[in-house]
Amino acid sequence: MPAVKKTPRPASIDLMLLQQEMNRLFERLATLGRSERPGTSEWVPSVDVYECDGCLRIVVEVPGLQPDSLRVSYREGELTISGERRDRRPHGVVGFLCMERPHGRFTRTIALDASLDVRQAQARLAGGVLTVVMPRVKDRRGRETVIDVVREQG
């Protein structure tokens, strides 16, 4: 019986898959020293956090998700973004030859060590990118606070 011979994949595809795996490994290693809690996520969206115009901006890649499938909350210095991408298999598909688009639930918790005005925070979803804008509270260190002195009877 002759052996079945697979046609080899182009080297560029192998390199791309290796790069994706290395990126995932480095992302996991980078989170070891952070206060971010490891989740029971089925997938992990990419996140950028930066400061611009007196605000913190948190940008999360969540292609294919709708606003009603996302939850953004803030508690005790931690911003938590969670959601779910449903498995959208085309009708009649028996099996996949390649399946790289993740689905399922995710949770990202990001420690934000800054004074923020959470009541003014905004979250917008456009083009598969969630952007959360959280204004910083103006620095109050230079403000004088007067404390009244009360005379005790005695």
Image: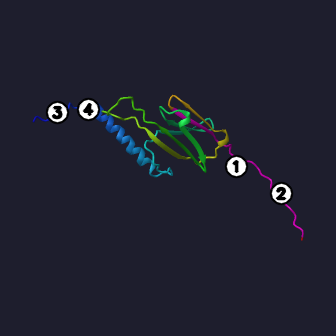
Residue kind at label 3, given as amino acid type: Lys
Picture quarter with the N terminus: top left
Earlier in the chain: of badge 2 and badge 1, it is 1
Residue at the disc numbered 1: 141
Q: Nearer the viewer, mark 3 or mark 2?
A: 3
CA distance separating discs 2 and 1: 19 Å
Residue 117 in sight here? no
Q: Position of residue 115 (x, y in %)?
A: 64, 46
Q: Position of residue 99 (x, y in %)?
A: 35, 35
Counting every numbered tag in the picture gives: 4
Q: Would residue 31 be found to the left or right of residue 139 on screen?
A: left
- Residue in the image at 56% along x and 40% along y: 71
Q: Which mark is residue 148?
A: 2
Q: Are marks 2 and 1 in contact (CB under 8 Å)?
A: no
Earlier in the chain: of badge 1 and badge 4, it is 4
Answer above or below: position of 147 versus 154: above
- Residue in the image at 57% along x and 41% along y: 72
Q: Are marks 1 and 3 in contact (CB under 8 Å)?
A: no
Q: Quadrant of residue 80?
A: top right
Judged from the image, the secondary structure of the residue bearing numbered disc 4 is: helix
User: What's drawn in magenta, residue-wise?
Assistant: 129-153
Residue kind at label 4, given as amino acid type: Ala
Judged from the image, the secondary structure of the residue bearing numbered disc 1 is: loop
Judged from the image, the secondary structure of the residue bearing numbered disc 2 is: loop
- Residue in the image at 39% along x and 42% along y: 24
Q: Which mark is residue 11?
A: 4
- Residue in the image at 49% along x and 35% along y: 62
Residue at the disc numbered 3: 5
Q: Quadrant of residue 120?
A: top right
Residue at the extreme left: 1
Judged from the image, the secondary structure of the residue bearing numbered disc 3 is: loop
Earlier in the chain: of badge 3 and badge 2, it is 3
